[in-house]
Each structure stands twice: as C-alpha cells, then as structure tokens.
Image (cartoon, rainbow, N blue to C red):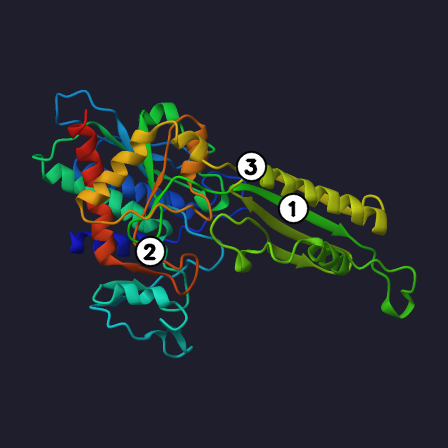
C-alpha cells in the first residue's frame, strides 16, 4: 500500500491544478481537467464502474456492493484543485525516510528549512516517511492526499473481495479552494446516503463543525491630484482602506484566534491613490456572531462614507458556506461510524472544529451529510507543507473500515 500511495500522490502533484478565483469557467483552470481525465482513466483501470466526468470536471465512480445486505450508499470525496496562496507549478516532492526529529533542509540554495523549532508538531512524526516540498512551491497535499487515499482504498477493496461492503460512490471535484466546489455538484446523481470529504489534516481528524463564512470585497475610490497641489483636493484610497482596517477589532484576526473564535481577515490588498481593492474573509462558528460581524462591516462602510463622501466605498458582501454541525447532528450515524472505524484501527479520533471549510459544509446543506476525515498532511497552502506516508496508510485504512462497518451494521 505504501508504494501505491507514493506513486499515485507523486503523479497527481506533478499536474498544476491551482484554481483561479478570477476565472468564470468551471473548472476555473485547465490543469484540473487534465488531472480529472487522468483519474477517470485510473478509476476504469482498477475496476471501478459507472465512471463519469461531466463538462464541469466532476468525476464520479461506483464500487458495486459485494453483499446481499441492505446497506446505505456511502460516498467519499476529495478535490483536485490546489490553493491560490502559493504557487503549485513545478511541484517537486522530496522524501524523508525515518524522520529523526531534526531540521529538514527543503532548499539549501535559498536557505529554506522546515524546523520543529518553528513547527513543533513535526516531532509527532519521528520515524515516519515524510513527503515535503523543495521550498519553491506548495506540495498539493490539500487535497491530492485525499484523492490518493480514496483511489487506493477503492483499489484495495477491489483486490480484497473478502471485505464485505455496500455500494460505495466516489467523487473528485474542482475549485474547492475558491469556494465553488459544490456549486455544480449533482447530489442526486451521486446517489449517496452519507458521504465524507477526505480533506483534513493530522492523524485522527474527524470534523463536523466548521466556520460560517462570508467574503467582503471593498473598493475604495479616491481622487488623485499632483501631491504638490493636493491640499484639500486629494483623496487617497490607500489611506481610506487602511482607515477601514483600523476600524476592525484588532484582536479578531487569524493570528490571534483559535478554537471557536472568529475573525476578519484581509486576504488581498491592491491599489493606488485613485482606487484600492481589498478582499476580506469573515468567519465565525456562532451564527449570531457571524451575522453581527457582517453587520459591523456594513456599518463601518456607512460610517466612513459619511467621512469621505457618498459613493466612495463599494461593498460586495456574500455568504460562502455555513456550519455543517446543524445538519450532521441530525444524522449521527455518519459521525459514529467514522469514529468507530478509527477506534477499530487504534487511531484516537480528534474531534475538533474546522477553522476553515470543506466542500462538505455546502454539500451537507444540499441534503447530503458530509463530515470531514484526516489525510495526514500539515502546513497546507505553502512551502512548508508536508505529508506523512504512515498516516496516509491509516487514512486509507479508515476509508476501507468505514465501508466495512456500514455493511456490518446494516
């Protein structure tokens, strides 16, 4: 299994699948279609049935039941795109066998080092085989590790027919990183009773609570005049944007919050004296606090418009997804089976809130309860991203055990 996981993952990360929020197409980038076609061919080659890919790049396939017992159809999902935060072009994975707990030099020429002094959780991986970046790109473990583990689990179940299971559906989807993954996902065509996104982090992660999420795009409209004659004439949009930021609660920022605490986060900032654009994400687990944060943004815009002039600030505010806890708790079996599967494999479940989002958040509200499972990756979206092959094996076995338990408990 180890060799299969490494071979598949290495193959997948070589394809640049970064999504693009500025693209109106689905998928938003051609690389995602390239990998989707590769996955279609592989699904067919390992013996999966009803393998399809639609015009939007959504791949689905079926592992038929090998039991006569009436079992619910269970689904497993992962996304093929990688984050926009850091380049995913030319990924060159590095391997560390039997990690000794010391510094890992990712790139000697650029002095880029993955160190437990900065990332103390590395010490949890002593003795593991790790896959890292070369310091110049992200790795793509989010979520090509999930794609790899689902594919390998299906291959394993096909090769081990003595493991009884009901019908299993798998899906590989585009554009999760830009929040569009579920937008064209056909829940009815998928046909599952319950599903799991395999899109989490460290060993044992079992997540069914996530942020309520919104995006705020602000355009500050200034008026540029030569600075030598600007008195009482110039309106500097950069300063307006800074003024807005200074109105937000300083302590409600990602770098100062954890657990169930929400935040405002300026994601991008670009502009000049004439016009500045800032994109924020707004997050909170509590729905009332979430609504209050959005209202505060709107009120702050109105306040600053009184200061700078009507029409000087344009706000586009939209919800992105909601806390799936409200849905999953109504279908406790989907959580209980995953919890028991991990316990059966001597994995201690880590039931923690997701300080982010997965496709499962939106898909749960589309009628398919979809909590999230671990993949074995850490430090997603940047050059310090790494992945434990040992924990990939455990993630793959968890998928297999979930399929088995649904049949056993039918």
Residue bearing mark 3:
287
Q: Residue furthest left?
A: 162
- Quadrant (top left/top right/bottom left/bottom right) for the C terminus: top left
Residue bearing mark 2:
377
- Tell me the element at label 2: strand
From the image, state whether disc 1 or disc 2 is nearer to you.
2
Q: Is residue 215 visible?
A: yes
From the image, state whether disc 3 or disc 1 is nearer to you.
3
Q: Residue at x 30, y 67 (%)?
A: 123
Q: Residue at x 59, y 37 (%)?
A: 288
Find residue 268 and report its horizontal and vertical position in percent: 60, 55
Spatial CA distance of label 1 from label 2 is 31 Å
Q: Residue at x 27, y 30 (%)?
A: 74
Label 2, residues with CA under 10 Å away: few <14, some 14-19, many ≥20: many
| Disc with the residue nearer the chain's start (3 vs 2) | 3
- Tell me the element at label 3: helix
Residue bearing mark 1:
217
CB under 8 Å between discs 1 and 2 = no
| Disc with the residue nearer the chain's start (1 vs 2) | 1
**Count of all numbered marks drawn on residues in the image:** 3
Label 3, residues with CA under 10 Å away: few <14, some 14-19, many ≥20: some
Spatial CA distance of label 3 from label 2 is 29 Å
């Amino acid at each position: 299994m180890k060799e299969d996981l490494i071979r598949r993952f290495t193959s997948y990360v070589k394809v640049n699948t970064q999504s693009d929020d500025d693209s109106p197409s689905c998928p938003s980038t051609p690389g995602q279609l390239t990998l989707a076609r590769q996955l279609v061919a592989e699904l067919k080659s390992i013996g999966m049935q009803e393998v399809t890919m639609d015009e939007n790049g959504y791949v689905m396939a079926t592992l038929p039941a090998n039991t006569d017992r009436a079992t619910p159809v269970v689904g497993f999902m992962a996304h093929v795109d990688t984050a926009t935060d850091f380049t995913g072009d030319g990924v060159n994975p590095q391997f560390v066998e039997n990690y000794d707990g010391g510094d890992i030099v990712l790139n000697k020429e650029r002095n880029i080092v993955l160190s437990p002094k900065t990332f103390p959780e590395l010490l949890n991986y002593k003795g593991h085989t790790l896959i890292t970046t070369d310091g110049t790109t992200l790795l793509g473990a989010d979520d090509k590790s999930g794609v790899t583990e689902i594919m390998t689990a299906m291959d394993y179940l096909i090769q081990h027919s003595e493991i009884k299971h009901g019908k299993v559906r798998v899906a590989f989807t585009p554009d999760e990183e830009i929040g569009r993954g579920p937008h064209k996902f056909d829940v009815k065509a998928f046909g599952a009773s319950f599903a799991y996104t395999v899109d989490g982090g460290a060993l044992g992660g079992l997540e069914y609570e996530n942020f309520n999420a919104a995006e705020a795009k602000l355009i500050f409209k200034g008026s540029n005049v030569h600075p030598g004659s600007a008195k009482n004439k110039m309106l500097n949009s950069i300063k307006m944007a800074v003024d807005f930021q200074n109105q937000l609660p300083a302590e409600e920022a990602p770098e100062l919050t954890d657990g169930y605490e929400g935040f405002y986060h300026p994601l991008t900032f670009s502009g000049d004296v004439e016009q500045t654009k800032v994109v924020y994400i707004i997050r909170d687990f509590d729905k009332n606090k979430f609504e209050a944060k959005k209202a505060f943004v709107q009120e702050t815009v109105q306040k600053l418009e009184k200061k700078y002039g009507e029409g000087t600030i344009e706000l586009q505010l939209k919800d992105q997804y909601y806390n799936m806890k409200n849905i999953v708790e109504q279908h406790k079996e989907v959580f209980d089976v995953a919890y028991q599967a991990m316990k059966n494999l001597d994995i201690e479940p880590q039931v923690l809130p997701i300080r982010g989002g997965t496709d499962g958040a939106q898909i749960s509200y589309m009628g398919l309860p979809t909590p999230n499972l671990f993949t074995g990756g850490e430090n997603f979206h940047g050059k310090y991203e790494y992945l434990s092959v040992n924990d990939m094996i455990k993630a793959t076995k968890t998928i297999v055990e979930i399929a088995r338990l649904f049949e056993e408990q039918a």
